[in-house]
């Protein structure tokens, strides 16, 4: 008897509640769609915000996930590597059996932002995988376009999966800084999964090994192993003043945490003409002195994931250069709830990657 294959997925059926196992008929790709058998899927901190149902804007304000387009039930998971098992009749440049990394940040394709090549910041109705359409916490996933399937070459499937968000986010943020001159200092605040990927590629992208600030001694130790030139506790008495004294103020900083405390530590560490890239989404708000912003001539940039072209560049970089290996723990797909809980509790160093 022929084996009947079903789609198994773990879905957010209710915000803050454990993900629920769902089984249904295996979808058949239509048009230019492709069906992947999920092989690896990273567990990202962004999923915690969807799971909670909101993003904290500070001052009592929130972006509610449902109002932003994340409709339930939803299968999260956007750091996906899988094997092509079926293709739609209009799919081109793809073959059954290929192993591919998925670019999940798909835009509507018609809004001005998408037309400018920044579909990851789509201002229209985005079908981003694992965010607004079903993602990789599942046995199979539908990908709507073949150009979003990337060859990851000699990289391991688990490491490649983290590049779809964690690595891409770090790479795009560091690219905004660009190459630093000799003697200029780079500060990275936050050594979580994204921060550690940033530390791993910082020297290759900016030319500088970073100083890293994190409140967790375990993560500071991991940062040193990933290539940080120094790791400090930002809560230590006088840490900020000591950093400015030692460096003359950093030329650039990336805040991978995204709390008021992390942002202020990074901002206050800048020298005149320094550049702060804000990445993290822990939430909240800060107050900035406008005269000092002007008189110091500093630049503040927001950076959210990255483009399809940037992911292609990152994969080339990772294969051309020996980047330090991100700490990765592989867990089975059915352990997704404990993985999310551990991530929320701050127990994860590096990345948990689910396997099926």
Image: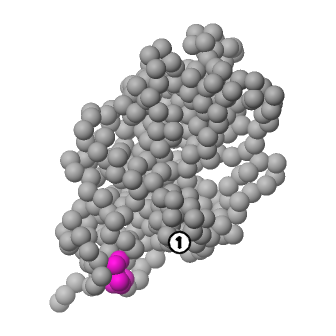
Q: Judge from the rendering whether residue 62 lies leftward or rightward of residue 255; answer left or right.
A: right
Which quarter of the figure is the C terminus placed in? bottom left
Measured as percent of width and height from the top left, residue 167 is found at: 42, 45
Q: Nearer the viewer, residue 257 or 300?
A: 300
Q: Which one is in front, 284 or 292?
A: 292
Q: Is residue 196 magenta?
A: no
Q: Position of residue 125 (x, y in %)?
A: 58, 72
Q: Residue furthest top?
A: 245
Give left or right: position of 173 versus 322: right
Does 29 appear in magenta? Answer: yes
Which stretch is magenta?
Answer: 26-33
x, y percent for residue 184: 51, 18
Mark 1: secondary structure: loop
| 80 relative to 192, above or below | below
* Residue pointed to by mark 1: 110
Q: Residues within 10 Å of mark 1 (few under 14, many from 20)?
A: some
Which residue appears at 57% of the width and 68% of the height?
111
Above or below 284: residue 164: below
């Amino acid at each position: 008897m022929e084996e009947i294959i079903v789609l198994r997925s773990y879905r957010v059926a209710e915000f803050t509640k454990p993900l629920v196992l769902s089984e249904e008929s295996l979808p058949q790709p239509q048009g230019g769609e492709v069906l992947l058998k999920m092989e690896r899927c990273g567990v990202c901190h962004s999923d915690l915000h969807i799971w909670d149902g909101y993003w904290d804007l500070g001052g009592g304000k929130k972006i509610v996930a449902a109002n932003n387009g994340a409709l339930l039930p939803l299968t999260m998971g956007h750091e996906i590597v899988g094997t092509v098992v079926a293709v739609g009749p209009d799919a081109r440049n793809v073959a059954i059996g290929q192993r591919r990394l998925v670019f999940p940040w798909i835009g509507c394709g018609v809004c001005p932002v998408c037309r400018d090549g920044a579909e990851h910041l789509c201002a229209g109705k985005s079908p981003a995988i694992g965010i607004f359409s079903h993602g990789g916490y599942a046995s199979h996933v539908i990908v709507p376009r073949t150009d979003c399937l990337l060859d990851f070459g000699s990289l391991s499937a688990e490491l490649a999966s983290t590049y779809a968000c964690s690595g891409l986010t770090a790479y795009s943020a560091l690219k905004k800084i660009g190459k630093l001159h000799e003697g200029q200092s780079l500060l990275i605040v936050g050594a979580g999964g994204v921060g550690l990927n940033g530390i791993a590629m910082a020297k290759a992208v900016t030319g500088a090994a970073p100083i890293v600030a994190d409140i967790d001694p375990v993560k500071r130790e991991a940062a040193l192993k990933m290539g940080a030139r120094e790791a400090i506790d930002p809560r230590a008495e006088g840490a900020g003043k000591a950093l400015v004294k030692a460096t003359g103020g950093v030329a650039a900083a990336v805040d991978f945490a995204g709390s008021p405390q992390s942002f202020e530590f990074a901002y206050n560490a800048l020298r005149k003409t320094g550049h702060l890239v804000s990445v993290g989404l822990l939430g909240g708000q800060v107050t900035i002195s406008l005269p000092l912003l002007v008189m110091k001539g500093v630049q503040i940039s927001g950076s959210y994931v990255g483009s399809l072209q940037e992911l292609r560049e990152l994969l080339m970089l990772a294969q051309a250069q020996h980047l330090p290996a991100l700490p990765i723990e592989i867990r089975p797909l059915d352990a997704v709830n404990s993985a999310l809980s551990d991530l929320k509790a701050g127990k994860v160093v590096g990345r948990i990657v689910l396997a099926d």
